[in-house]
Image (spheres, helix red, strand yellow):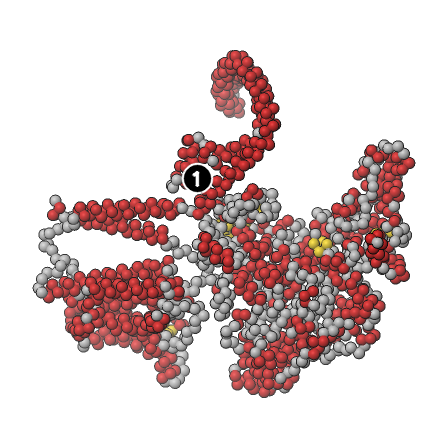
Amino acid sequence: MNDERYWNIKLLNKWFAISSVVFMVSMIWMFIDDNDDDFKVYQREFRKMEILKAEEKLDSELEAVKQERVQFEEKLQIARTALDNKQGEIETAQIELDNVSAKFYKANMNFLNAKSIVDAEKYQYETVKIHGHGDELKKAEEYYNGLLEELYELKLKKEDFEGRMLAQDASIKNMQAERKLAEDELNQVLKEVNLVDRKLSKLDRDRMSFANKLGDIVRDLPILDFMAPYYKVEQVVLPDIKYNVNFASVPEVDRCTSCHLGIANPDYVDAEQPFTTHPDLDLYLTSSSPHPYEEFGCTGCHNGRGRGTNFTSATHTPSNADEKKEWEDEYHWHKMHHWLKPMLPTRYSEASCFKCHNDEVQIKGADKLSHGLALVDKYGCNGCHAIQTYPNRRKAGPDLARLNEKVDKEWTAKWIRDPQSFRHNTRMPSFFGQTNNSDEESLKRNETEIATMVEYLFKDGEKFSTRNNRKYMGDAVAGEALFNVVGCKGCHVLEPDPDNLPQVNTLEGMLSKHGPNLIGLGSKTSAEWLYNWLKDPNSFWHETRMPDLRLTDAEAKDITAYLLSFNNAEFEEQDDLEISTEALDEIALGWLKKMYPEKESESRLDAMSYEDKVGYVADKSIRYYGCFGCHNIPGYEKAKPIGTELTVEGSKPVDKLDFGFQHHLDHNNYTWFTEKLKNPRYFDEGKEIPPEDKLRMPNFNLKPEEIEAIVTTILGLNDDKVGESVLASRAVDDPMVYEGRKLIRDYNCKGCHVIDGFGGQIAENYSAPEYAPPNLNTQGAKVQPDWLFKFFKHPMVIRPNLQVRMPSFTLTDEEWNAIIKAFQHWDDNNLSFESEFHVDNSTTEFKAGKKLHELGACNNCHFYGTEFPKQGAQTWAPNLALTKERLHPDWVIEWLRDPQNIMPGTKMPAPFLPDEEILTLPGAESDWGKYVMKMNGDQEAMLEGLRDYVYSIKGKVDITNEIQSYFKQHGYDFESDDEEDEDDEDW
Amino acid sequence: MSYIKSFIDFLSAPTISFTLLTVAFPFIFPPSDYFEKKNRQWGVYKLWTNAGGFWVFVLITLFFIVGYFDPHFNLTMTKPDNIPIILMIYSMYFLTWLGMKKAYANDERLDRGEKPEEWNDPDDKVLVWPDLVYIELIALILFMVALIVWSILIPAPLEEPANPAATPNPSKAPWYFLGLQEMLVYFDPWLAGIVFPMFIIFGMMAIPYMDVNKKGEGYYSFKERRVGYFIFMYGWLVLWVFLIIIGTFFRGPNWNFFGPFEWWDPHKVVPLTNVNLSEYVWVKLLNKGLPVNIIARESVGFVAVIGYLFIMPILLAKTKLKHLYDHYGPVRYATLMLFGLTMFALPIKMYLRWMFNLKYIVAIPEWFFNI
């Protein structure tokens, strides 16, 4: 046979055998490779942990019911014994029940049968009734009625058996009732135990029957595991969280919980990763939190590849180099180059809050992002870089239209050259002396650029003069005292030493940094200007956020004298800047060449006069540096901002960011942003570029914390899409609320007031919180909106012993309305119009209230119109005649019930209200009066009575003048009295 | 080592490597007696001996080993997409070596007047089963094993979702089209992407009708059809396989050329100074502006192209290739010339580009017609 064949068949057989075996092995390998997922390893481990936890819980639950269960078990035992005795009876009853049930079954069948026939016949009969006549109709009617009768008989029969069956059943149940009851009771006691026990029996193979154990193994075998495996990918589809695949947005699918198994379970706080509980379950994951897992998943906030089921493919991102090393060693982690949106490093997680909370000012639980957004606003990032989702509300820097009245040319030029040398913590960024323009040539060029820009700003001549200084300066000592208390410190500091600055790298710190650090003003401006500015800031600069504190002329002069007493000698000694004609020509020519051919540029330059050149270079420089991004400069109102648009900067592909020659940097966007903010000219290093093309973003001299906050914000500016239904703005009924909150931020209300649990840093300047601006907790529920509006327009004295003043802000009606809306929203009170509260002074409550009011001696502290309180100024409290117009009646009740709850630290005591017991004491009537007695200890009614009485107090509402003239006469030194009192006590 | 690496980088520049290959090619696959003589004289034929095969195999492997430990080439070489190219290099070399080895053995037998090795008595037949099907089955199984193991060891190279606004740099065609993509550097898309691929397919379909040489049918032989062998191997190995290798390993960001051991710096800038033939003639040579009339402007190019494709074959038929024309007849001769000249247009255009920065011979962007 073999010799007929070309190949040696035996050899081929061997090859076939070998290749088949190899094939088999490769198939097995494939199966193993396919089923050996990381998450299964974790799930196995977690199952063990779950068993341990459940066992612990079972033990503790058993321990907890140890005593209790004995009693119920005994009861059950007795019931069982009793039931056993009735066994014979029950059996007989059961036989009878079976018997009756069988008969019912048959009767019911017959009935249903007949009924279906009747239904069909009914249709026939109806047809005949319409179309038939005479005999036919009569016959049909007879036939139909006959059937109905038959059906009736059958129904009776069926119902008879049914009744007997139910009765029999009930009697059996009755006999067993006692045992059932005992069982239920015991189960109630063992509820938790049974729950854990059932869970354990599903988890722990050792507790399973053999068949179940086998099933538990088989369900996870390859191929068979498509049905109902124990170890499986856990996933959630998030319809509102979109992943952008360029041509479409698809819902995210998160499989993170395949490994992070304990993430939403508070039992695993101490477990190792990946099983650890999420650190903030109140805010995330749980169904009762605002961000339930089913709706937001994990990648909704953390980004990353939700579908990834191993450490690398989920695109975890290490927080730092050490962690990266650790991950590489432990998990063989590597960057997934092609996944454009890797997980955010933990420190930037808050960036994602912006997707849904983009209109909010202070996002609860996202301090870093809120800080970043506030910084973007304060530093005016969006002045040069358009951010459509976070637009620029106002130019960040002052209006320069009337700069020539405020300062002189020398000061301006030096300031532009190095703002920090005048004010160490200024927000004016440094354009010059940076890494790409510190060489000799650039310095010369820049000096000329600055000088020409100054020329432009002073084109109407210097109107600044210190000649009249004396006329506008009062007593500096009095000025200092006033500066410290009248409210300046709500927004300003005056701190020459950079090391002594308050912590300014946080959201809190920003409050006292709202306005500039007022150092060295003596080297900057004139008394005349400062005085006028203090008296009416708005007339100098319409958009200023500096309010009018309604200072008297004398007060303004005192503060002027105080502020001008600070000088900056070093700054004054700096060399003045001068235009170098050489550099001027060079700069002008450089710009000309950008537009015209070489020869033409030169001839154009030749044709320019010196003034033309200065004007030309000034214009080019202002446009190049984009000064108008932050300042209003006449002539540049319509100039386009010069920076890259940042609306979706966080989604910009990394390769679109120019890393220049900084090859050592990690190639990810947050590293680039961080380096850019640290040194905006960093990526110019090593490049050959003409001065007109150099990087020109100025250096904001940011602190590392600030950079991190801003990077978080930029990462939040991305093209991630979310569904309408998860937008936070949906929770707010009126968009004006957001506008109001923004205004509250813009005008730094929180510098003085605690609003929504945050702010009021000014309080540290006062001896006690009650002398500081009030906490505005519950403000929205507290005051009547129309009163509040009036108050905003014309602030008056409410708290008579406060030296700090509510300033007058020049806001539009719309803006005030928005602010009122914002306050109302915080306290769930959305009414714009409210009916007046009328008091019926004939009621018992009112009379009781009057008595309680007398006993409470309210007039010790409160004003009654122009009637002064009995006690001294340190305990003075608001004018009660104002109540009716100002406060909400409902709020007053809450306030009287517990003032400390609403305004922690207030000196207002809760009025003492007698309860029923006190009122039954002998002599109660003489103490409390008959009306209070009638209240029968109903404290709610007493509060209402008291409130009603207060609302009936009449008198002058605005007592500002009376109070002011009192303090003019007596001074504000009661605060020190107070302290002395304390000293006395100590002594 | 770094010196050797930069030398290799230098050698692999397409201008150098392509020229070297083109020059060396006739000595490796000698199409005439002269080259045959040199081939023997210099011992090039030893490539096809066992030892020659072994040493070339060692050289290729050594290159990849060195490359693996080079930080830059490692990145290109270990990319999952590029694994098939490495396998292709080995398989191409092995199959060429095997074919040539067998051809040389047969050539010697034929010289001695013996029958080729593959020759069998026409009555001596083998059965489909088991002689054919059985080994096919075994081969199939082993191939499956290879694919399975490959898929386990090297996961599929999936990338990010396609984004028309952010294309990868370099954007590369699938590996089997990299030859075409390389042609796009020198020709307009309609030529390199449409005409040439069609010519390749039709040309290969036409080969059996043009080459009617009965010799070498059913057995390996080089001498009996050395011109055909040379032309085909040049087209296949140099103009296709080699271009794929260039496209895979040597084309980096912005489709710039990078030697194997160079860093693929996306910022590398290469001067773009290409000039059209019409500009050469009218502007540089005659010192005047380009004629307004498009046909007049491109007349030189048209003359060159028509001359190359149509006039030259006629002249050749009457002179140098008269014997070929006589032997083939007009139809077969014309077909052979059309396909052959189109094929050689590629290296010609490449050299014109490299030597004279020639952009297009005929440049009519107005009509989207550039050659």
Q: Secondary structure under badge 1?
A: loop
What's the residue at 87%, 61% (across, down)?
A971
What's the residue at 61%, 73% (across, down)?
A431
Instruction: Report x, y in % for residue A232.
Output: 45, 43
- The amino acid type found where label 1 is placed reads Pro
Q: Nearer the viewer, residue A987 or B183?
A: A987
The quadrant in which the N terminus of chain B is found is bottom left
What's the residue at 62%, 64% (across, down)?
A703
Instruction: Report x, y in % for residue A187.
Output: 57, 27
Instruction: Report x, y in % for residue A720.
Output: 54, 55
Name the residue beneath numbered marker 1: A229
Q: Which of A128 and A909 is in front in this view?
A: A909
The chain ID associated with circle 1 is: A
In this figure, what is the number of numbered marks?
1
Tell me if I can see residue B264 in this picture: yes
Asked if A293 appears above or below B299 in the picture, the reply is above
Asked if A175 appears above or below B136 in the picture, the reply is above
Instruction: Report x, y in % for residue B9.
Output: 35, 71
